[in-house]
Image (tube, helix red, strand yellow):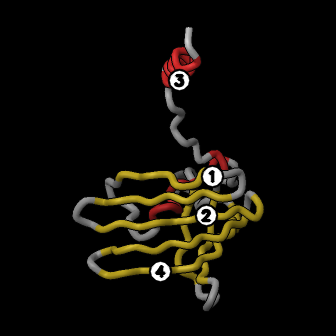
């Protein structure tokens, strides 16, 4: 077998392994509960949310959108996701974990026909209110 034949066999074997979908495992390590989101430049509370799945923080400006996502970075301390919501806009969000109770969020895109760009600090402040078990 020639060296080209060996390389072809090696490539064929490598392509038989299915690609792994990004897991965004860093988000799974964040504590569930009530989170307060503040603008980093103004210290103004942007929103408070009950978080059962931290992936909700990816689409702050498109919370109910049926959006497609493309994972750009899936690291141990940081994730970056670009998403498109047909008819509603798009965005790109980076979430960087400082601890499992404190993250920095940078998000930008288009929502309701208008651009947005925001730097946010999100901090877990306690348990979710009774009856809000998201």
- Packing grade of label 1 (10 A; few <14, some 14-19, many >=20) is many
Relative image position of residue 2 (x, y in whole percent):
56, 13
Q: Look at mark 4 in the image and give the residue it sits on.
A: 117
Q: Residue at x 44, y 60 (%)?
A: 82
Judged from the image, the secondary structure of the residue bearing numbered disc 2 is strand
2 versus 90 height, above or below: above
Dot 4 crowding, Cα within 10 Å, few <14, some 14–19, many 20+:
few
Q: Are circles 2 and 1 on residues that touch, CB within 8 Å? A: yes
Disc nearer the start of the sequence (1/4): 1
Q: Quarter of the image for the N terminus: give it.
A: top right
Measure how far apart labels 2 and 4 are at the Cα level: 14 Å
Between disc 2 and disc 1, the foreground one is: 2
Q: Which of 58 and 44 lies nearest the eye of the viewer? A: 58
Alpha carbon of mark 4 to alpha carbon of mark 3: how far? 43 Å
Q: Which residue is mark 2?
A: 95
Determine whether 60 is above or below 31 in the image. below
Q: Residue 125 at x, y = what percent?
A: 70, 68
């Amino acid at each position: 077998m020639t060296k080209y034949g060996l390389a072809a066999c090696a490539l064929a074997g490598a392509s038989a392994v299915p690609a792994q979908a990004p897991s965004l495992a860093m988000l799974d390590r964040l504590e569930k509960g009530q989170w307060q989101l503040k603008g980093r430049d103004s210290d103004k509370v942007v929103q408070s949310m009950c978080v059962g799945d931290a992936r909700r923080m990816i689409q702050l400006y498109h919370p109910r959108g049926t959006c497609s996502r493309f994972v750009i970075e899936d690291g141990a301390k940081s994730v970056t996701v670009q998403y498109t919501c047909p008819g509603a806009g798009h965005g790109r969000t980076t979430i960087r974990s400082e601890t499992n109770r404190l993250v920095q969020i940078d998000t930008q895109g288009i929502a309701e026909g208008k651009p947005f760009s925001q730097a946010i600090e999100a901090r877990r402040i306690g348990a979710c209110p009774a009856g809000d078990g998201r």
